[in-house]
Amino acid sequence: MKYFREVSLSIYKKYNTLEKIYELYTNYTSEQEELIRQSPDWYCDTIILARVLGKKDYPDLVLRYREIVKHYHQGLYLPTYEKVVIALENHPTPLISTRAN
């Protein structure tokens, strides 16, 4: 319980909106980028957030991340990535209303 109060709760309070989570996902250092590239789910999560929030950079992110996913892990995760993109394209944008873009 102590860990939850001291660590987890502070993280929940800091990133308590989709907008804040999106900022966390899109603002990373070059050192963090190598770790991110090892996690194909990160790219799917980011484009989902961008689409849900109606971000103007959504189309650019889809194209940029497609190339990255295609080259990492010998394209193993590309079919999954493409399924996520297709699912997102079948929904209106934004999926929720937001003030910031």
Image (spheres, rainbow, N blue to C red):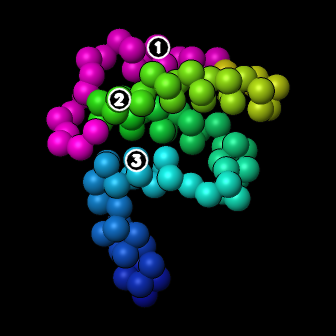
* Residue 47 in the image: above or below residue 8: above
Q: Residue at x 46, y 32 (%)?
A: 47
Cα–Cα span, label 2 and label 3: 13 Å
Q: Which residue is mark 1?
A: 86
Mark 2 or 3: the one toward you: 2
Q: For the magenta stretch, what is the residue range?
A: 79-101
Mark 3 or 1: the one toward you: 3
Farthest-out residue, bottom: 2
Choose top left, top right, bottom left or bottom right for residue 76. top right
Disc 3 + disc 1, Cβ < 8 Å: no
Q: Quadrant of the C terminus?
A: top left
Mark 3 residue crowding within 10 angstroms, few (<14) / some (14–19) / many (20+): some
**Which three-letter amino acid code belongs to the residue tagged 1?**
Ile
Number of the label disc, if any, that sits on residue 61 = none
Q: Name the spot of residue 49 as percent of width and height, x first.
A: 39, 38
**Which three-letter amino acid code belongs to the residue tagged 2?**
Lys
Q: Which residue is mark 2?
A: 56
Secondary structure beneath dot 1 equals: helix
Q: Which residue is mark 3?
A: 22
Label located before the other in sequence (2 or 3): 3
Magenta-colored stretch includes residue 98: yes
78 horizontally vs 12: left or right: right
Secondary structure beneath dot 3 equals: helix
Q: Residue at x 30, y 17 (%)?
A: 91
Cα–Cα span, label 3 and label 1: 20 Å
Report if residue 62 is visible in the image: yes
**Which three-letter amino acid code belongs to the residue tagged 3?**
Tyr
* Residue 26 in the image: above or below residue 51: below
